[in-house]
Image (cartoon, rainbow, N blue to C red):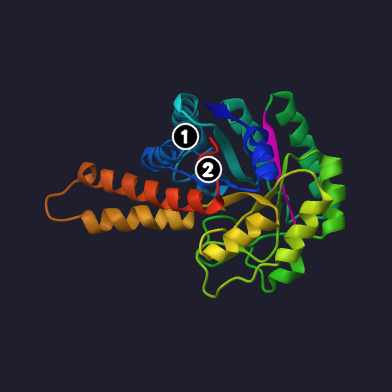
């Protein structure tokens, strides 16, 4: 069933579990994600990021993801992750996406507020939801999202007092916070500021989002959720699992159709692992 962020994240915040966003660029990944959600009876957020659009155009993905979400036996949010331009967010909403993230985190604070509030008004008028980012989640060299590699991530951590003001003024439905993670595959283990997560979670009502989830330890995830994270973004781990399975299945005379089932199954298993870790299994 088609849902928006409020439908799945408000219960997650109350129940102290998290719902995963699994970005997808094609039918195989989408099939794996939704199959995992239905098998575990877990709500799920599926979608794509603006930086991934060269691999799966937004309009084409809308024709695929929205009907799949409507037919699913569990709540499925169709979400634009890291929309970098207002026009991309508007297009996603026009196409029927039920949620958008407008990432203005590299802009100055007041400009971030102004831009997010504008798209929040549009999204809410259509029954959709909006996620924003305050502080800035960095990017590893292998990142598929963004292009801002930070020399010292702690300089960009989210300020709790500013987070409260930001949410009050923008009316964002979910807030991505910078607490020590980065997008892409890590060279060195990240160090999360769990106290900051807890402090922000106690100061604002809207659900908190953890970006840069791929590569974190089980403890990192569980502690982050315990401290107040309600949504976790995953792409790299799932993407690598599908590619590895298809590469290992390849052999002489095998075509793409021979490999697709392996990619779908590996994606499904990678997603199920995360859902169990986040505590969303059985919550759909």
Q: Position of residue 260 (x, y in %)?
A: 27, 44
Q: Work out whether 43 lies above or below 199.
A: above
Which class describes the residues within 10 Å of circle 1: few (<14), some (14-19), or many (20+)?
Answer: some
Q: Residue 53 location, x and y as percent?
A: 50, 44
| Position of residue 98 measured from the top left corner of the image (x, y, whole percent) | 61, 31
Q: Secondary structure at mark 2?
A: strand
Rendered residue at 53%/66% (across/down): 217
Q: Which mark is residue 163?
A: none
Q: Is residue 87 visible?
A: no
Asked whether the beta carbons under mark 2 and mark 1 sit within 8 Å of each other, the answer is: yes
Mark 2 and mark 1: Cα distance apart in space: 8 Å
The part of the chain drawn in magenta is: 128-135
Q: Tell me if mark 2 has few (under 14), some (14-19) or many (20+) residues whose alpha carbon lies within 10 angstroms of its own.
A: many
Residue closer to the observer: 269 or 64: 269
82 within the magenta span: no
Give the side of residue 178 with respect to residue 27, left or right. Answer: right
Q: Is residue 253 above or below residue 137?
A: above
| Residue for badge 2 | 48
> 44 or 225: which is nearer to us?
225
Q: Residue 73 placed where, x, y %?
A: 46, 28
Q: Nearer the viewer, residue 138 or 199?
A: 199
Write down the quadrant of residue 31 in the picture: top left
Looking at marks 2 and 1 on the same chain, the residue that comes earlier in the sequence is marked by: 2
Task: Give me the residue at 69% from left, 25% from top.
Answer: 127
């Amino acid at each position: 069933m088609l849902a928006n962020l409020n439908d799945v994240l408000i219960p997650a915040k109350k129940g102290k579990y998290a719902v995963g966003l699994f970005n997808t660029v094609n039918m195989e990944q989408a099939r794996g994600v939704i199959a995992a959600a239905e098998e575990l009876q877990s709500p799920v957020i599926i979608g794509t990021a603006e930086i991934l659009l060269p691999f799966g155009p937004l309009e084409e993905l809308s024709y695929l993801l929205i009907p799949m979400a409507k037919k699913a036996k569990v709540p499925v949010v169709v979400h634009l992750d890291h929309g970098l331009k207002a026009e991309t967010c508007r297009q996603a909403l026009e196409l029927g996406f039920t949620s958008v993230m407008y990432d203005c985190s590299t802009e100055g604070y007041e400009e971030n507020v102004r831009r997010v509030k504008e798209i929040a008004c549009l999204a809410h008028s259509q029954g959709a939801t909006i996620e924003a980012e305050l502080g800035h989640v960095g990017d590893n060299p292998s990142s598929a999202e963004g292009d801002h590699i930070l020399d010292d991530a702690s300089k960009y951590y989210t300020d709790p007092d500013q987070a409260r003001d930001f949410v009050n003024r923008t009316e964002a439905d979910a807030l991505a916070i910078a607490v020590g993670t980065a997008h892409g595959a890590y060279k060195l283990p990240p160090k999360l500021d769990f106290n900051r997560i807890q402090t922000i979670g106690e100061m604002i009502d809207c659900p908190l989002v953890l970006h840069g989830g791929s590569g974190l330890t089980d403890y990192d995830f569980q502690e982050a959720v315990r401290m107040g994270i309600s949504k976790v973004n995953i792409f790299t781990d799932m993407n690598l699992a599908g590619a590895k399975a298809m590469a290992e299945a390849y052999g002489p005379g095998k075509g793409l159709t021979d490999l697709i089932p392996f990619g779908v199954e590996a994606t499904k298993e990678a997603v199920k692992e995360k859902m169990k870790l986040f505590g969303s299994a059985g919550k759909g």
